[in-house]
């Protein structure tokens, strides 16, 4: 019988403890802000549950990806399958045995033509988003593929693995462009807006900022006390959000790479993050079964969604910002309508 690990087949279940936060400093020398369990819920919720999509997955949904128009949703599961939902249809395309092990990462290309999946079977696969047909496979990693990111121009794929490498691939040809040794396994990834920088969240709690074309490690941040499970770059490019197994979310200035603010409200590990297109609203999913929506300027929780009854491994906004999608270990996908009040 296949057991459900915490983060991956190579991981060890870690007991979470309450941590004292070490504050960073901004350019003007002021101490960075720490927000702990603050809430400022509006009189009317800014988020309403639209629908629950009852998947055919037979185990945890680890990963989701949403097309730019919000009308296509893909989900990847511990059961090794992928489902592609073309809304408003309630019958997904099912890709059984899409991989030989759990699927932890999914990404849709900017042109909405392709879906990329990464698995604990060490492989990456490219799929036609409309039909679900396999186009090609990327081989090279020697251990679990934990994270994927596609450059904004849609030409380059980045992948992070337990084999301690960050690899770059040509999406059109499938050729490996280069492999960067980062010294630790890569838990999460994000591209800069110009595609010249790739940011890696590490299992150790660090964050590395690479100018990948020059093989230059631009910055190494001692960011968190434990694994950096999620990264999200604000659409305006000014902020990076990092979410950790240490229960905290941190905001970073992408010009200086100094910590601006630490957010704390989740009771267990932060598993997923997504910025709203307005760059001010941030969604976070957690092992505590909740989704929290943050006003990052105020550092407050403005909505707290409790409809999932198991851990929330993935969250994503549609490009126009009117919908939020979440995927959970309870084997469901939920769609939410979003109306930011700022």
Image (cartoon, grey):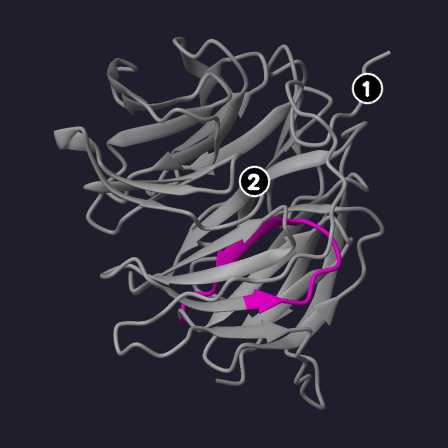
Q: Position of residue 221 (x, y in %)?
A: 37, 47
Quadrant assignment, res 152: top left
User: Residue drawn 81% across and 42% down?
Assistant: 330
From the viewer's side, name the closer residue of 58 and 102.
102
Q: Position of residue 17 (x, y in %)?
A: 74, 50
Please tell me whether mark 1 or mark 2 is closer to you in this view: 2
The kind of secondary structure element at disc 1 is loop
Q: Which residue is mark 2?
A: 227
Quadrant assignment, res 240: bottom left
- Indicate yes or no whether the magenta region holds residue 183: no
Left or right: where 68 falls relative to 219: right
- Indicate yes or no whether the magenta region holds residue 271: yes
User: Residue drawn 34% across and 43% down?
Assistant: 110
From the viewer's side, name the closer residue of 179 and 110.
179
Give the crowd class for mark 1: few <14, some 14-19, many >=20 residues within 10 Å: few
Is residue 129 positioned above or below 50 on the image?
A: above
Q: Which residue is mark 1?
A: 3
Query: Which residues make up the magenta segment?
Result: 263-278
Is residue 272 positioned above or below 97 on the image?
A: below
Is residue 342 positioned above or below 268 on the image?
A: below
Contact flag, marks 1 and 2 (Cβ < 8 Å): no
Q: Which mark is residue 79?
A: none
Q: Position of residue 116 (x, y in %)?
A: 45, 28
User: Residue drawn 71% across and 43% down?
Assistant: 90
Residue 28 at least partly seen: yes
Residue 324 at least partly seen: no
User: Residue drawn 59% across and 58% down?
Assistant: 248
């Amino acid at each position: 019988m296949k057991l459900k690990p915490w983060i991956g087949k190579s991981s060890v279940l870690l007991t979470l403890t309450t941590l004292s936060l070490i504050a960073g400093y901004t350019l003007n020398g002021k101490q960075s802000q720490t927000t702990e369990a603050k809430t400022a819920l509006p009189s009317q919720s800014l988020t309403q549950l639209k629908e629950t999509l009852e998947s055919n997955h037979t185990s945890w949904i680890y990963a989701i990806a949403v097309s730019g128009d919000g009308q296509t949703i893909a989900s990847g599961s511990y059961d090794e399958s992928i489902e592609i939902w073309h809304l408003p249809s309630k019958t997904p395309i099912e890709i059984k045995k899409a991989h030989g092990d759990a699927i932890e990462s999914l990404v849709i290309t900017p042109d909405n033509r392709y879906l990329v999946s990464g698995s604990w079977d060490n492989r990456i696969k490219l799929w036609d988003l409309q039909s679900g047909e396999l186009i090609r496979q990327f081989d090279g990693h020697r251990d679990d593929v934990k994270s994927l990111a596609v450059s904004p121009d849609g030409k380059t794929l980045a992948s992070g693995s337990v084999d301690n490498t960050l690899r770059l691939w040509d999406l059109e040809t499938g050729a490996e462009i280069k492999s960067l040794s980062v010294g630790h396994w890569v838990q999460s990834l994000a591209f800069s807006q110009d595609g010249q920088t790739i940011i890696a969240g590490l299992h150790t709690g660090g964050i590395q900022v690479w100018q990948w074309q020059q093989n230059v490690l631009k910055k190494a941040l001692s960011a968190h006390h434990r694994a950096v499970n999620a990264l999200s770059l604000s659409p305006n490019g000014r902020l990076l959000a990092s979410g950790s197994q240490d229960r905290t979310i941190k905001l970073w200035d992408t010009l200086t790479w100094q910590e601006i603010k630490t957010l704390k409200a989740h009771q267990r590990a932060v598993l997923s993050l997504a910025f709203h297109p307005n760059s001010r609203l941030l969604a976070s999913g957690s092992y505590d079964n909740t989704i929290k929506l943050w006003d990052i300027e105020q550092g407050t929780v403005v909505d707290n969604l409790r409809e999932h009854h198991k851990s929330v491994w993935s969250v994503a906004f549609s490009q126009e910002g009117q919908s939020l999608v979440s995927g959970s270990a309870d084997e469901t996908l939920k769609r939410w309508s979003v109306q930011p009040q700022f």
